[in-house]
Image (cartoon, rainbow, N blue to C red):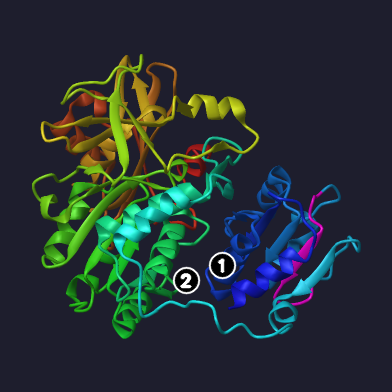
């Protein structure tokens, strides 16, 4: 296996235990063999967002102290920024031989590594005759190491990126819990449009590898019809996306008119999806299972899931805890709240991160007595189903009122002329903070500011109606598909 050869090469470099190895590669077979090759050698993988500016990539490499960099050839044009004079990198592996200013850094190509040594044919491969049972998979959790396996950097929406440290046990436990509730098996084929450096994309990779399933990688979501054609051609059984992916597919593609006869399920995570969008997906595909999920990078990532058979009844809910995970809703003193009361969602389980890389104070703030404090506000109903009500840092304090950006976004999305929206607070002399909405109209629609404001006043009251509204052709997004609110705020 190619990943074994990558692992053997890394083992030959005489690196110390715990060495961090950075990956700057788009979704591809090169990414996959590198990721598992690092694990094979017993080192720490650091997947890096390939959409970041070179300066931020360089910051991450320096921050984690990566001594080896696997990099896609197209990124080498910025090698002097990625690997500055003080960079810890000692080895660079790329598609083509890297020409570096720092001559002391050793370089190799993928071909040089993969074409050396004996071929390895006795390794297990996907599609084996005896895939493990669910009980056997759960047994592997206790056998998994608590050693650091990977560092996933968050998008850095509130400053410099933070490195989330996940252990082998974190990843294994959450992978198997996800396999459990999604009922994944060897026959499953997932359509991958989410980047593997993103924890949701990483989950797709791990879950399908562990059951011997298949991954269909297509990095061309800018062309939705291409993705849909690939889904039909490859007979995929699952599709996973963030809310913006579903908004685009439902409103700006032929997906609602397609049968997708081999598809068994959809999964959605990576931010709250407005109930209005979920309704449209349900209407287009009444026979498909739709799994609404919730998680965080710090939880490796899955925390809760909504059983598809309860979707219509519990619309807007993020569901119940994934197997082997606990959830509580607590007040500011840490006391558990009763059904219907809103407080912070906290979670505990084998999936909770080791902490933030080199940030002990941030770690103490996030993890207390084994519980991860998510920063999300939520409540439970009488059946124990959880509903997100907002985010601590996305509560706008306007004129003495506390307003959830999520509530306003969902309200505006109900307006038939609106395709996408992002809501946030902006400084205001009178109110302290005013509500601003950035709206993307549906194709061919013109919207007046007053239309949106009247719609919000009618449904939520005057104090929740945006004072400022801006119209754009599209919202800026990270490569994961999440809306880049920080960029919108900075440009306001």
**SS assignment for the magenta stretch, majority:** loop
Question: Please, which residue is most extreme toward the left here?
Answer: 313
Q: Position of residue 148 (x, y in %)?
A: 59, 46
Q: Position of residue 341 (x, y in %)?
A: 20, 22
Residue 226 picture quarter: bottom left
Residue extent of the magenta highlight? 87-97
Is residue 239 found left or right of 122 in the rendered image? Answer: left
* Structural crowding at the residue carrying mark 1, measured as other residues with C-alpha within 10 Å and reported as few (<14), some (14–19) or many (≥20): many
Residue that numbered label 2 is attached to: 219
The reply to whether residue 179 is visible in this rendering is no
Residue at the spot 16% in from the left edge and 35% down from the top edge: 384
Q: Are marks 2 and 1 in contact (CB under 8 Å)?
A: yes
- Label 2's element? loop
Residue that numbered label 1 is attached to: 26
Is residue 320 found left or right of 390 in the rendered image? Answer: left
Q: Position of residue 113 (x, y in %)?
A: 72, 77
């Amino acid at each position: 296996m190619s990943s074994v050869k990558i692992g053997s090469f890394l083992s030959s470099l005489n690196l110390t235990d715990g060495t961090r190895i950075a990956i700057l590669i788009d979704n591809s077979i090169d990414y996959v063999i590198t990721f598992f090759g690092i694990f094979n050698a017993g080192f720490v993988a650091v997947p890096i967002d390939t959409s970041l500016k070179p300066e931020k990539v360089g910051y991450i490499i320096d921050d984690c102290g990566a001594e080896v960099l696997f990099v896609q050839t197209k990124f080498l044009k910025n090698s002097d920024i990625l690997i500055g004079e003080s960079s810890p990198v000692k080895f660079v592996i790329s598609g083509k031989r890297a020409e570096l200013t720092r001559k002391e850094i050793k370089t190799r190509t993928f071909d040089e590594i993969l074409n050396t040594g004996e071929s390895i044919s006795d390794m297990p491969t996907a599609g084996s005759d005896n895939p493990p049972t669910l009980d056997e998979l759960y047994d592997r959790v206790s056998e998994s190491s608590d050693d650091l396996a990977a560092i996933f950097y968050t998008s850095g929406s509130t400053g410099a990126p933070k490195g989330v440290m996940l252990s082998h046990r974190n990843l294994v436990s959450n992978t198997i819990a996800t396999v459990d509730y999604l009922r994944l098996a060897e026959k499953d084929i997932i359509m991958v449009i989410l980047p593997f450096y993103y924890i949701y994309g990483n989950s797709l990779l791990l879950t399908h590898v562990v059951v011997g399933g298949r991954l269909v990688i297509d990095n061309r979501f800018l062309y939705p019809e291409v993705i849909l054609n690939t889904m039909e051609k490859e007979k995929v059984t699952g599709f996973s996306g963030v809310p913006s992916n579903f908004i685009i597919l439902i409103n700006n593609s032929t997906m609602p008119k397609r049968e997708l006869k081999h598809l068994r399920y959809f999964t959605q995570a990576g931010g709250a999806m407005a109930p209005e969008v979920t309704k449209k997906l349900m209407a287009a595909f009444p026979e498909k299972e739709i799994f609404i999920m919730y998680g965080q990078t710090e939880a490796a990532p899955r925390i809760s899931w909504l059983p598809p058979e309860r979707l219509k009844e519990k619309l807007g809910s993020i569901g119940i805890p994934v197997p082997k995970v606990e959830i509580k809703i607590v007040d500011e003193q840490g006391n558990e709240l009763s059904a219907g009361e809103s407080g912070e969602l906290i979670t505990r389980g084998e999936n909770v991160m080791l902490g933030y890389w080199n940030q002990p104070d941030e770690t103490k703030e996030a993890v207390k007595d084994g519980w991860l404090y998510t920063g999300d506000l939520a409540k439970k109903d009488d059946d124990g189903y959880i509903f997100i009500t907002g985010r601590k840092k996305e509560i706008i304090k306007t004129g003495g009122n506390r307003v959830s950006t999520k509530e306003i976004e969902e309200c505006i999305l109900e307006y038939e002329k609106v395709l996408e929206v992002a809501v946030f607070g902006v400084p205001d002399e009178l109110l302290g903070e005013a509500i601003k909405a950035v709206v993307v109209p549906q194709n061919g629609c013109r919207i007046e500011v007053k239309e949106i404001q009247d719609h919000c006043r009618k449904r939520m009251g005057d104090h929740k109606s945006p004072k400022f509204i801006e119209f754009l052709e599209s919202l800026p997004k990270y490569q994961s598909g999440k809306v880049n609110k920080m960029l919108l705020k900075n440009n306001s």
